[in-house]
Amino acid sequence: MSYSSSRFDPSDYPYIIGIDFGTTYSGCSYFYTEDSTGEILEITEWPKQRGAIYPKVPTASLYEANGKRMIAWGNDAIFKAQRPNNKDVLVERFKLTLDPNIASKATLPNGLTSLEVITDYLTAFHAYVLEYLDRVLGHVYQHSKSRYCLTVPAMWDDQAKATMREAAILAGIVSRADNPDRLVLTSEPEAASLFCEKKCDQFELEEGKRFMICDAGGGTVDLIVFGIDDNNGKKTLREITKGSGASCGSTFLDARMRRIFKTRFGEYYQDNKQAINHIMKQFVTVIKPQFENEDDEFFSMPMSLKLSEDELSEIGIEDGKLQISVDDLREEVFEPVVKQVLDLISDQVNQARKKLDAVFLVGGFGQSKYLQERVKETFESKIGLIAMPARGELAVVRGAVIFGLSPGRVSHRVARRTYGLAMDSPFDYIQDPAEYKYIAADGSVMCKGRYIVYVNKGETIEAEECVTHKAFAFYPQNISAALYVYDGNEVPPRYTTHYRVRKVSNFTIKMPFIPNAYTNQKIGATLNMYFGNTEILVEIKIHDKVFRSASEYAAHELEKISVPIDREEESENDDDDKPEYSFI
């Protein structure tokens, strides 16, 4: 995926589409730059809503039994899965399979992979978005002139982010030949911060102030602290802390609530699953967002219970209602999950090292009254203002559009990991083991596999800061670089063979045609790496040609070699079987 860097012009894309791909619900906002109202709008009408108007659609897919064909998505998938005698498989919360902390424990049915399930969902989701925009914008809308911003959790690693880009390509959101800047990725708390930054005047936050975003959604909770800079009247945001997060969103409350119902119903649980699904819906839609740790809750049971009077009494159902005490709700359902969120906030407060001016609670779970009260009572002495912005559940999807309009609004980011390349270096007889030694063609004694660090974990990097490396290849071999990562907090290891150093990415550029170049001629190249964005971008300059590429991570099921868009000058002796040459 490479192209001439001069090809991308944001003014060619007047339609900005923000996609918040969530664990439980996904949303879409859009903006037309030539609309005089200057208003960001979100899609509130989704297929099979049955009269309900809600700005998000369930992140759910229905697959045929024992197969890999998706037969429904969103609301339709859930309705069809609930039909009597349904044999098809409902797949939900599949976004969590990309969480690096739990991915190894997450399994998908029917042999499906994360990439396949996410691609299937995004294909259907995006097809509906195009249909909707065609309908509401009419003849002025042109898909080819749309630019996209896709949000990802702050805690995701580079493989997970690259899998999302690959899924977006396979889903037809953008094409592989497109300039990577047509699809930008941003972290969910970063998008939310741009939404909240517009409200800074309302909360009297100005240059030099620091605020935390706590984006608590259905599956994940992401946090980060930003500082406000004002450069000649233009506000930008600077990351102060390394973003953190965990899978401890509101769906984990649902799981704990269902566990209580399982305990109460005991041996009668399996025969009354439909009734339990009915009272779970009461919990999700009514009790969960409004719970304030004050009253017992009573669940209205449907008439379809397959239980005798004695069995009803044994479970604790009286007059058609099941009572759950406020103590059980607090201790068994809310507090274990909320405590994880409080620990995450505490970690960010400690990283920031000085009192924060504000924290904004956004996301669906961020609207929970219990969570809000617990944050206030725990941190009111350490944080100046604890605020829940209006329509906070839309903060991420609206912020995605703001980011798509102005990616430069976030001026500095903090590196989540230590990044470097594998390079050969002069052999050190004191430090380097003998088995790493070799004699180069020019007779020099060299050490192979050195891990040369370019960016250290925790380092603050400007968004456009460039790390440059000079290299060469022998014409007409392809040019390839391997990126390695170290996640530890200690001094990085000396060699890429260390068990905690992982190869995460290959950047491969097809050697362009160079007039008058001869076979095995040494061709110089400049490798520029940009680590200050949500994704790592690489720019390679070879003679008068410039290629920019988003990384191609080893986790992809598909791995492609980058080729120039402009191919009229390609060599007639194009030999794909020739070995690629790695930077040294």
Image: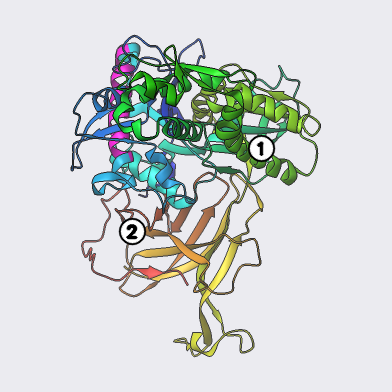
Assess whether residue 131 is covered by the magenta stretch: yes
Task: Report which residue position mark 1 lands on.
Answer: 342
What kind of element bears circle 1?
helix
Q: Quadrant of residue 212?
A: top right
Q: Is residue 437 visible?
A: no
Q: Up-down: is 336 above or below 297?
A: below
Pick the residue in front: 253 or 142: 253
* Point 34% across, 48% down: residue: 107
Q: Position of residue 483 (x, y in %)?
A: 48, 62
Colouring convention used in this rendered image of the protein: rainbow
Assess whether residue 48 is covered by the magenta stretch: no
Q: Which residues are magenta?
A: 118-135
Q: Quadrant of residue 432?
A: bottom right
Task: Report which residue position mark 2 lands on.
Answer: 512
User: Tags 2 and 1 in contact by the CB under 8 Å rule?
Assistant: no
- Closer to the eye: label 2 or 1: 1
Q: Position of residue 387 (x, y in %)?
A: 68, 22
* Point 49% across, 61% down: residue: 526
Q: Is residue 165 left or right of residue 243?
A: left
Q: Up-down: is 324 above or below 249?
A: above
* Point 59% across, 38% down: residue: 336
Q: Check residue 400 in the rendering and tell me which mark sits there, or answer none.
A: none
- Work out whether mark 2 precedes mark 1 in sequence or the reverse, and give the earlier one: 1
Q: Amino acid at mark 1?
A: Leu
Q: Is residue 427 visible?
A: yes
Q: Amino acid at mark 2?
A: Pro
* View extreme (front): residue: 310
Q: Up-down: is 97 above or below 307?
A: below
Q: Residues within 10 Å of mark 2 (few under 14, many from 20)?
A: many
